Image (cartoon, helix red, strand yellow):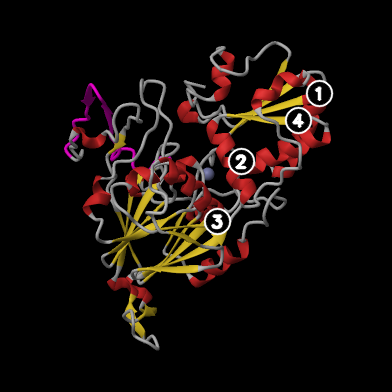
């Protein structure tokens, strides 16, 4: 009995057809052929399904970023099983009021999911959902270049398929504000203007990107809250609160005429998060009870056994390290968007009477947005300008800097190579790296 049960509960290996996660390691391997582009020429994979693209793939000129694109993977089609019979599938035409309920067979409809990035790689998360001629994009991220992509600063997805279907796309839905989920958005929006939906912090971070690209005010940014639903064509998108290393992260449930798809986005289950409440597990349970056509779950580090530490435990670790570094200057390298972590460092600095300086443009930018929107609590007088470091002794300082994921231009690596304008790392410095060196970029790390 038990062995029978175990056999049933084993996930089936569907190879390329697997759709169980935005970063599912096995999925899309064969379909993904990298197309490297550079200004001097391009190296193209000679697969028949490879989209041939002219050199206009390079966005911008002069000092601008270069890009690398991925060929879109084959879409995955999902249908409710026919024997499920008739079910309620939403409301009538727009403008029909009171809305008339339509009863159609869910099996008559299907949902197509096309992964334009984010599978079998870290970063560049972008997924296109399609049902009954309506489409929407979920996330629009960037990736950091691998060590062998010389001269490449940023990797963005191939938007060819999106451009081709632009009239059907109702908008871009964002799960959270990490670079690998929002980083490519300006490059997409300057080709196709689409309404964007996200939580306040996510949209705050997006808006600062749009300003950099001269797109601010030209794009419709729609704020959503967990628990809220929006309608995009025949699909209705529900936002569900989750825990992640950046506040205001959401999962989504996509209610379609074919059934409900649950996409977790990036998440962790943290019963004691530093900011916001615990993940809304009750809502996931309710959705599960009412029937889900497909669960698409984040799978980063799923092969590691055990549990992810709660952020409270990480806070305790900082406390221990700060005590240990008593006589040194402390330099903490972390993701610029890991706001929960930065809050812990600020709290620790306050506790041990140290001043905090930030290094790295993305770090300073994110801090400004997060504190303005109230997602981070900065005690008065705690932050000092990096130019004023010389006025304090080493043991009075904490320097928070970027330096993770193999970003070749990250502030920490520049400091280490004496290439930083303001800070040089010496033997008396105590360096804390609070970020996972991601597998895809371990060569450069
Ligand atoms: Zn994330």
145 sits to left or right of 274: left
92 sits to left or right of 46: right
- Is the C-beta of the residue carrying label 3 under 8 Å from the nearest atom of ligand 1? no
What range of the chain is rendered magenta?
Answer: 23-48
Number of dots carrying numbers: 4
Q: Residue 71: percent from the left, percent from the top?
A: 27, 40
Determine whether 222 is above or below 126 in the image: below
Element type at mark 3: helix
In this rendered view, identify the residue nearer to me: 60 or 400: 60
Identify the residue under disc 2. Answer: 367
Q: Residue 411: percent from the left, percent from the top?
A: 56, 24
Identify the residue under disc 3. Answer: 200
Q: Which residue occupies the extreme bottom position in the image?
A: 98
Element type at mark 2: helix
In this rendered view, identify the residue nearer to me: 61 or 138: 61
Dot 1 and dot 3 residues touching (CB under 8 Å): no
Residues packed near mark 3 inside 10 Å, few (<14), some (14 to 19) or many (20 plus): many
Q: Is residue 171 magenta?
A: no
- C-alpha gap between disc 1 and disc 3: 38 Å
Q: Residue 324: percent from the left, percent from the top?
A: 81, 23
Q: Earlier in the sequence, mark 2 or mark 1?
A: 1
- C-alpha gap between disc 2 and disc 1: 27 Å
Depth check, mark 3 against mark 4: the one in front is: 4
Identify the residue under disc 4. Answer: 355
Element type at mark 4: strand
Residue at image position (34%, 73%) is: 106
* Quarter assignment of residue 76: bottom left
Element type at mark 1: helix
- C-alpha gap between disc 2 and disc 4: 15 Å
Identify the residue under disc 1. Answer: 324
């Amino acid at each position: 009995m038990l062995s029978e049960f175990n056999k049933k509960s084993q996930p089936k290996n569907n190879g390329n057809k697997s759709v169980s996660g935005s970063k599912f390691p096995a999925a899309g391997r064969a379909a993904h052929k990298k197309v490297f582009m550079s200004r001097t020429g391009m190296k193209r994979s000679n697969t028949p399904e490879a989209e041939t693209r002219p050199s206009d793939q390079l966005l911008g000129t002069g000092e601008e970023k270069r890009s690398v694109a991925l060929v879109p993977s084959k879409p995955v089609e999902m249908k409710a099983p026919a024997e499920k019979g008739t079910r309620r599938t939403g409301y009538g035409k727009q403008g029909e009021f009171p809305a008339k309920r339509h009863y159609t067979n869910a099996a008559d409809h299907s949902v197509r999911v096309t992964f334009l990035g984010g599978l079998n790689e870290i970063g560049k998360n972008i997924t296109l959902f399609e049902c009954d001629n309506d489409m929407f994009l979920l996330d629009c991220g960037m990736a950091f270049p691998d060590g062998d992509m010389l001269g490449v600063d940023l990797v963005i997805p191939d938007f060819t398929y999106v451009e081709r279907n632009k009239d059907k796309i109702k908008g871009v839905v964002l799960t959270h504000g990490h670079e690998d989920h929002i980083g490519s958005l300006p490059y997409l929006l300057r080709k196709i203007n689409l309404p964007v939906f996200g939580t306040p912090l996510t949209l705050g971070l997006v808006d600062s990107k749009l300003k950099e690209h001269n797109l601010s005010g030209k794009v419709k940014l729609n704020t959503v809250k967990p628990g809220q639903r929006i309608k995009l064509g025949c699909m209705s998108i529900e936002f569900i609160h989750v825990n992640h290393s950046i506040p205001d992260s959401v999962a989504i449930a996509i209610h379609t005429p074919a059934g409900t798809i649950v996409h977790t986005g990036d998440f962790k289950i943290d019963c004691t998060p530093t900011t916001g409440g615990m993940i809304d597990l009750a809502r996931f349970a309710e959705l599960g009870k009412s029937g889900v056509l497909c669960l698409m779950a984040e799978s980063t580090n799923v092969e590691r056994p055990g549990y992810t530490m709660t952020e409270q435990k990480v806070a305790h670790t900082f406390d221990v390290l700060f005590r240990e570094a008593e006589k040194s200057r402390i330099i903490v390298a972390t993701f610029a968007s890991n706001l929960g972590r930065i809050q812990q460092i600020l709290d620790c600095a306050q506790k041990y009477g140290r001043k905090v300086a930030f290094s790295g443009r993305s770090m300073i930018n994110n801090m400004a947005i997060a504190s303005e929107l109230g997602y981070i609590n900065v005690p008065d007088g705690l932050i000092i300008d990096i130019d004023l470091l010389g006025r304090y002794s080493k043991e009075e300082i904490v320097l928070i800097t970027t330096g993770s994921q193999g970003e070749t231009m990250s502030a920490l690596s520049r400091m280490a190579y004496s290439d930083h304008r303001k800070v040089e790392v010496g033997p008396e410095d105590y360096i804390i790296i609070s970020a996972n060196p991601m597998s895809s970029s371990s060569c450069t790390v």
